[in-house]
Image (cartoon, helix red, strand yellow):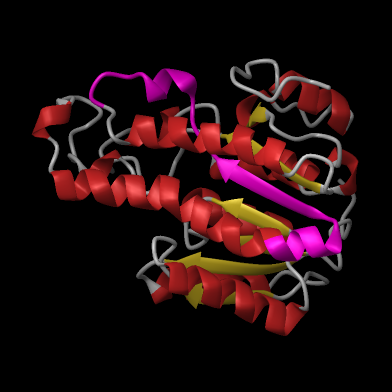
Amino acid sequence: MAEGELSGKTAIVTGGGRGLGRAMALGLLRAGANVVITAARTLQEIETVENEGVKIGDAGVLRKFVADVTREEDCRLVVSETMREFGSVHILVNNAGRGMRYVSEKFFDTPTKFWQTDPAVWRMIIDTNVNGPFLMAREVAPHMLKQGWGRIINISMNHETMRRAGFSPYGPSKAALESETIIWAQDLAGTGVTVNSLLPGGATDTGMVPSEVSRARLLDPNIMVPPLLWLASESAGQVTGRRFAANLWDSSLPPEQAAEKARSAAGWMVPAP
């Protein structure tokens, strides 16, 4: 994507304080978009990203909010403030999520049986990973429909991880998010608003991974940026209800060919017209 191709567009990235969210927010900013990032609790993280954004020359504007996507009023506030400042919202990246570290710090090596999981933790993960994207998409959809243009991108994970022993409720939550992606894409068909899912394609160097795991074996969060920018662009206007693996994206190819390669591992998707 050419630098500045998203100039004039406004994006919201939930969970934008670190890891995948930070990488995607800064990537959108470099592409010229105005970017609003959220974090549920930690102001310091999103302040750090905001300071990084200031150093990016000829970029869009970056704003931050402490907002919990499980709270309807927080989601409404983020979208209303985005509309107030920028006049529109074009791109929503549903990245905020809670992972297996809330169940057990040893989840990589010692699976937790589902009946051993604290019900409060189960509800928290499901609430963030399933209900959060719904509440955010519910707030932005009317604005996107009115302007006849929008991109909703849900951050997912490998199907293998969804079925991995001991990975509930994280696995089921992302399976639900993929179902949401397909259904919303059909609900919005023909409106100019697309809905797709994007996943790293493997374990990634984020706060969801225990510190003792070797970083050398993890993917760089920045692999998400090239496919994200394409999905957010005019070029992907006819692509909806699809699933893309960032580690399969080949930036040496033209974007449409890179997208086809990254889509080759897709499982669930809306049937092609």
Image location of residue 35, percent across then percent down: 68, 67
In the image, residue 64 above or below residue 22: below
Image location of residue 228, percent across then percent down: 70, 44
Q: Is residue 157 magenta?
A: yes
Residue, far bottom: 84
Can the viewer see residue 273 in this picture? yes
Image location of residue 209, percent across then percent down: 34, 40
Image quadrant where residue 239 sits: top right
Please give the count of numbered marks on the rendered protein: 0
In the image, residue 189 above or below residue 39: above
The residue at 69%/38% (across/down) is 185
Foreground of the two, 273 or 260: 273
Is residue 23 left or right of 29 when viewed as pictured?
A: left
Foreground of the two, 48 or 40: 40
Image quadrant where residue 258 sits: top right
The residue at 84%/59% (across/down) is 6
Can the viewer see residue 32 in this picture? no
Q: Is residue 237 magenta?
A: no
Residue, far left: 116
The residue at 78%/27% (across/down) is 259
The residue at 38%/52% (across/down) is 128
Q: Which residues are magenta?
A: 142-166
Quarter holding the C terminus? top right
Foreground of the two, 258 or 84: 84
Image location of residue 225, percent across then percent down: 68, 45
In the image, residue 102 above or below residue 169: below
Quarter holding the N terminus? top right
